Amino acid sequence: MIDIADPSVGPEEVARVRDVLESGRLADGPEVRTFEEEFSEFCGVEHGVATSNGTTALHTALHALGIGPGDYVLTTPFSFVASANAIRLVGATPVFADVDPETYNLDPTAVEHRLETGPSVDAILTVHLYGLPSDVGPLRRLADEYDVPLVEDAAQAHGARYDGDPVGSFGDVACFSFYPTKNMTTGEGGMVVTDRQTVADRAARYVNHGRSSEGYEHVEVGHNFRMTSLAAAIGRVQLDRLPTLVDIRRANAARLDEALADSSILTPSTPPGFDHAYHQYTVRSDDRTGLADHLAEAGVDSAVYYPTPIHEQPAYHHVDHSAPITEHLADHVLSLPVHPGLSDADVDRIATAVLDYETHQQ
């Protein structure tokens, strides 16, 4: 079976973890500080605050911006539920705008309409879904016009760029996940990046029980959202390898694009000026279940990200919202393997299985 994901971890990561184990500094410490510096530099921003996972990164970022009870955060309904859960975890309320049918990311026109016609919002949280940057140019302008912070959920977009600049550098704050299936991993982990010193300082306190840099003085109530030195050790090696890993994903995606160009399957759209990092290679099919079943019989794994929009999840039944484009996409998208562990023969086998399915349908 060709798996949908295959974390790429090798002897370099093992050696770095061994060094940390031998140092005795296993929890938060110098290794984490160095990883924060290296990752924020990669994103082109001044500050990084490591966390225990991507959800705690989002939670921390919103808290650090001062978002809390009584506030409203405008976001996408087409994402992993953590994007909206983090809003609720700080006591705020998510409100949704629909997505662009080609990119699957927040549609700036829908966002502008929501800002013009709905109750005021206190932040915009955009998601770079599947590794494709959202249209952060107009979103940044809208955030500035309405004087609200822009938050980037870049959990799936390590290495993606917009107009030549890395994702994570457009928002007032941005968040990444290092879950094993992501473009780079720490096992579990997350990162908050920002150019705003006050946001970085508050985030650093919040992940460490609200503790100031002066001994055991706790200036606010916080959480233990810290990253371990063991995770940071893996992350530092993965960050060095990230450009190569993303290049392989792009090459695999290009090979699939070429092979499927004349099929009825809709392959991923990448507008000019957008550099896709291909966390997922997500196609659209009018018979997703049939395609997925055929792929499984051919030994090719696939997955649906995400079958139920957030506003239709049981935990969000109180949210009164309609997002017809999101609802249509949720019924039609299917992600195919694109990870760096694939050989050219594997990619060709995936494409052949898709084309063979189409032949059988004719």
Image (cartoon, grey):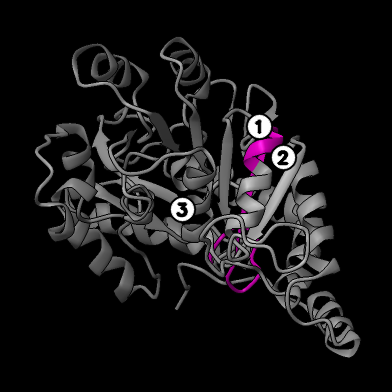
The answer to whether residue 199 is seen in the rendering is yes
As measured in the structure, the alpha-carbon distance from the residue carrying label 1 to the one carrying label 2 is 6 Å
- Relative placement, left or right, of 175 versus 15 is left
The amino acid at mark 1 is Ser
Residue shown at 58%/31% (left/top)?
172
The answer to whether residue 248 is seen in the rendering is no
Counting from the top left corner in percent of width and height, residue 151 is at 49, 35
- Residue underneath mark 1: 169
| Mark closest to the chain's N terminus, 2 or 3 | 2
For mark 1, give the secondary structure. loop
SS assignment for the magenta stretch, majority: loop
Looking at the rendering, the stretch of residues picked out in magenta corresponds to: 180-199
Residue 193 is one of the magenta-drawn residues: yes
As measured in the structure, the alpha-carbon distance from the residue carrying label 2 to the one carrying label 3 is 20 Å
State yes or no: discs 1 and 2 in contact (Cβ < 8 Å).
yes
Neighbourhood count class around disc 1 (C-alpha, 10 Å): few under 14, some 14–19, many 20 upward: many
Counting from the top left corner in percent of width and height, residue 142 is at 43, 14
Q: Which mark is residue 43?
A: 2
- Residue underneath mark 3: 59
Q: Looking at the image, which is closer to me, 69 or 190?
A: 69
Residue shown at 23%/42% (left/top)?
329
Neighbourhood count class around disc 2 (C-alpha, 10 Å): few under 14, some 14–19, many 20 upward: many
The amino acid at mark 2 is Cys
State which mark lies toward you, 1 or 3.
Answer: 3
For mark 3, give the secondary structure. helix
State yes or no: discs 2 and 3 in contact (Cβ < 8 Å).
no
- Relative placement, left or right, of 39 versus 301 is right
The amino acid at mark 3 is His
Residue shown at 74%/72% (left/top)?
28
Q: Looking at the image, which is closer to me, 30 or 135?
A: 30
Q: Looking at the image, which is closer to me, 334 or 7?
A: 7
| Mark closest to the chain's N terminus, 1 or 2 | 2
